Image (cartoon, helix red, strand yellow):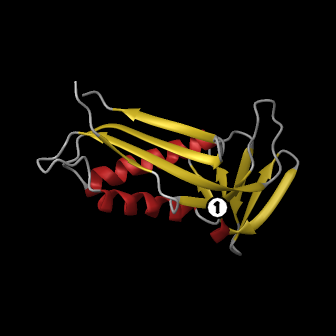
Amino acid sequence: MEEWSIQIDKEYLKFSAAHFLIFPDGSAERLHGHNYRVYVEIQANLSPHGLVLDFLQAKPLVKELVDELDEHWIIPANHPDLHHEQREDGVIEVRYRDRYYAAPTEDVLVLPINNTSAENLSGWLGGELVQRLSVRFPELQLHVLEVKVEETPGQRGVWRLRNNI
């Protein structure tokens, strides 16, 4: 069985973001940041023109997503012990156990994940990419989508979607 894919690994597909990870025992990292790098592989049927998807169409879509994350503090909306509240004065308050943070709302991105791990970030990016690919390229017969988020060289969280073919 033959398979085709494109892999996208460009230096500019990166974002800088702050976060803290919450561990299973309830302890948490200090607030800190990473210069994350994103890698994508799209496996699909070849078009009649011999392409999975034109790189010139795929790269801007990934760039659009990483730009949405860039220069934000990312917090998880679905963690049971982390809570956030939007104040009327344009500030978001974040509480985790005895920690309290307040930041301008435009600096904070609340994602529908339960922790800000590289794995969850790759899953959020992957889910968004699936939606945007289906809207922009409805003819694309996606077989596998893999998204990797590297938080530091050599450490990546990986998310993979396999469609039944």
Q: Residue at image x 23%, y 41%?
A: 141
Q: Which amino acid does label 1 sit on?
A: Ser
Image coords of residue 94 (percent x, y): 75, 56
Q: Is residue 25 above or below residue 94?
A: above
Q: Is residue 70 among what the camera can see?
A: yes
Q: Residues within 10 Å of mark 1 (few under 14, many from 20)?
A: some
Quarter the N terminus occupies? top left
Give the percent coordinates (x, y) of residue 118: 62, 43
Q: In this view, does 63 lie to the left or right of 104?
A: left
Q: Which residue is drawn at 18% across and 48% down?
A: 139
- Image quarter where the C terminus lies is top left
Q: Which image quadrant is residue 155 in?
A: top right
Q: Can residue 113 be seen in this view?
A: no
Residue at left offset 34%, top offset 56%: 58
Q: Residue furthest bottom?
A: 89
Q: What percent of the width, then of the height, locates residue 7? A: 39, 46
* Front residue (pair 60, 81): 60
* In-front residue for pair 64/79: 64
Q: Name the residue under label 1.
A: 16
Please give the name of the residue rendered at 49% of the width and 37% of the height, measured from the top-left corner.
159
